[in-house]
Amino acid sequence: MSQVQNSSSVSELLASNSGSINAARKSDEDMQERFLKLLVAQVQNQDPLSPMDNAEVTSQMAQISTVSGIDKLNTTLEKLVADSDARRSFEAATMIGRGVLVPGTDIQLESQAAIGGFELAEPVDKLTVTVKDGAGITVREIDLGAQAAGVGTFVWDGVANNGNAAADGQYSFALKAMRADKEVSASTLAFGSVSSAQAGKDGALLEVGRLGYVGMDAIKKIF
């Protein structure tokens, strides 16, 4: 039974491809037919005292071949772009419900736990996270010690510098990375959960809760 279904599917695919090929072939034939009609008319109405030479005819024949080839190339490229867009949309849909790290400084404290991330272009000897409240006041400083280059994460347990538990809610954080006695660049990454996906002008967009919409290429890590 399985073999019959597969044969049917193959037949349908071949029939579909055959229709597409025939349509493309007819388009090429129509173009060539129009060109030949124009060429014949040009030859019939040429000046007998100054007829077209062979080089000119050959040049025009080469032009129609070039145009036909460009049309085929454009059709192929359009199909590749459409296939790529469809694949990206599918990949975006599979991201729903996943946690991601994207560029940002927000950090959300819930039930004494908050996740943040960082990206380092080079290894560092010391990385310090400074968590601030909505008024910009420092709530907690966390020493993450030495870190390797690349993307990493940290967890804040919600404890403030004074030892008290901070209230759940939205905070921000900054990074300070040191290598020997020199401060080096460190990028902050915000954590969020993907709630939906939609098509955008430049590709698929993911809605990451309070972080808003981000492109697929903005994602630094997936959980």
Image (cartoon, helix red, strand yellow):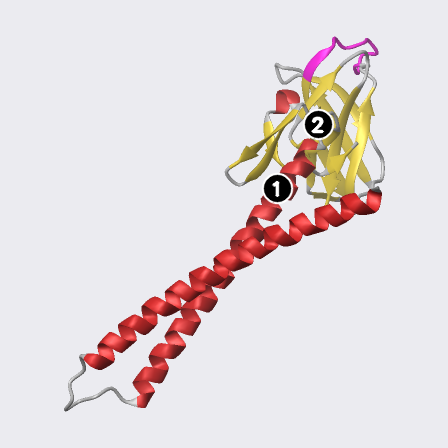
Q: Which residue is drawn at 83% across and 32% down?
A: 144
Task: Estimate the x, y position of residue 148 in percent, counting from the top left.
Answer: 82, 44
Alpha carbon separation for disc pair 2 and 1:
16 Å
Q: Which of 64 and 12 is in front in this view?
A: 12
Q: Do the residues labelled 2 and 1 touch (CB within 8 Å)?
A: no
Q: Quadrant of the C terminus?
A: top right
- Span colored in magenta: 160-170
Q: Which residue is drawn at 45% across and 61% down?
A: 26
- The amino acid beneath tag 1 is Ala
- Above or below residue 192? Residue 56 is below
User: Of helix, strand and loop, which one carries label 2?
Assistant: loop
Q: Residue at x 83, y 18 (%)?
A: 157
Position of residue 183 in the picture relative to residue 163 (left or right): left
Q: Main secondary structure of the magenta part?
A: loop
Q: Residue at x 36, y 84 (%)?
A: 58
Q: Name the residue under label 2.
A: 96
Q: Mark 1 points at which residue?
A: 86
- The amino acid beneath tag 2 is Ile
User: Of helix, strand and loop, which one carries label 1?
Assistant: helix
